[in-house]
Amino acid sequence: MARFEIGGRLLSADFARPLSIAIPLAFDGPQPSCFDAPPATARPFEAGRFVGDTRAGGSCNCELVTLAPHCNGTHTECVGHVTEERIAVTDCVKGGMVFALVVSIAPVAAASTGEGSDPVPAEGDLLVTAAALQTAAARHVGPAPRALVIRTVQGSADGPLQSYRGAAPAPYLSRQAAAWLVDRGIEHVVLDLPSADRADDGGRLTAHRIFFGLPAGSRRVAEARRPQSSITELAWVPAVIPDGYYLLDLQIPAFQADAAPSRPLLYPVQFE
């Protein structure tokens, strides 16, 4: 058990009971799929007479893994996702526990809200709105979180192993929702969606740029006001995890890349 203080409040958490909100990636089974990317694969490494498969007579198992982090499962990305400079996610996300709030919201039809994006949402597009985030967050009274985990009704209903195809196969953040996250000091956002933006948005990535503090169309990391921020996509928040406050541990391998597969862990906190 750990006891700590945040914003003048005493809290405790049991570090022996983490809750994973990552989608397990089965190389030989069903996987989530985005942007028409090929499935992630794993095959035995072979060198001379060595084969990395004990089932084929090898002395041990050793596999070559091929995947696209942005497309093949839960991943965390940084400002380098949209800049010309190659910025590593592990240089931006230093690790450690982050005070987080989990909220559940229902995306709404773009035509039914005054919120929007760039480009203008098409008929039938669904948005995660600032209004919905504000309403959900207002139900919880506590210290200001640095991370927000957003569970959508769409994500909770259909399961994690979805195939996202087409121009707008899933809800995405409105421009106002991204600005709301910035205004509330949220440095790390976790989504159960394939992208913070519309799949086909003409390359604008409006919500990404707002969240990272980049001007519209900018590809220069020097112009980012929030280079320490991160976006985690394709997470999965089971219904058994209630809304509320947690500690978030974004576990990321030390890839020198703009994104990497990740395993976000949540630790429920108790106020003392």
Image (tube, rainbow, N blue to C red):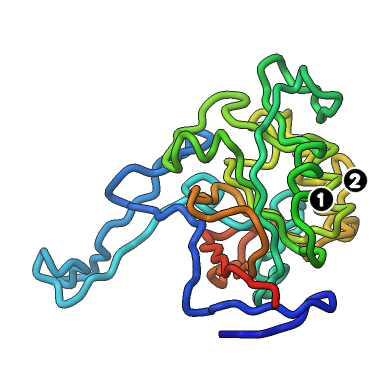
Q: Residues within 10 Å of mark 1 (few under 14, many from 20)?
A: many
**How many discs appear?**
2
Please state if 148 lies on the left or on the right of 58 as rendered. right
Residue 1, relative to residue 66: is it above or below? below
Mark with earlier residue (1, 2): 1
Residue drawn at x 14%, y 69% as measured from the top left: 54
| Residue at image point 56% right, 85% down | 1
| Lateral position of residue 140 relative to residue 182, left or right | left
Q: Residue at x 61, y 24 (%)?
A: 167
Q: Does 186 appear above or below 40?
A: below
Question: Residue 156 appears at what percent x and percent y?
Answer: 51, 40
Q: Residues within 10 Å of mark 2 (few under 14, many from 20)?
A: some
Check the image and name the residue furthest to the top: 123
Q: What percent of the width, then of the height, locates residue 214?
A: 87, 50
Furthest residue toward left: 57
Q: Position of residue 165 (x, y in %)?
A: 51, 28
Real-space Cα distance between discs 1 and 2?
16 Å
* Residue 215 - label: 2
- Identify which amino acid the numbered label 1 is placed on: Leu
User: Mark 2: which amino acid?
Assistant: Pro
Q: Nearer the viewer, mark 1 or mark 2?
A: 1
- The image quadrant where one finds the C terminus is bottom right
Give the quarter of the image for residue 264.
bottom right
Q: Which residue is mark 1?
A: 181
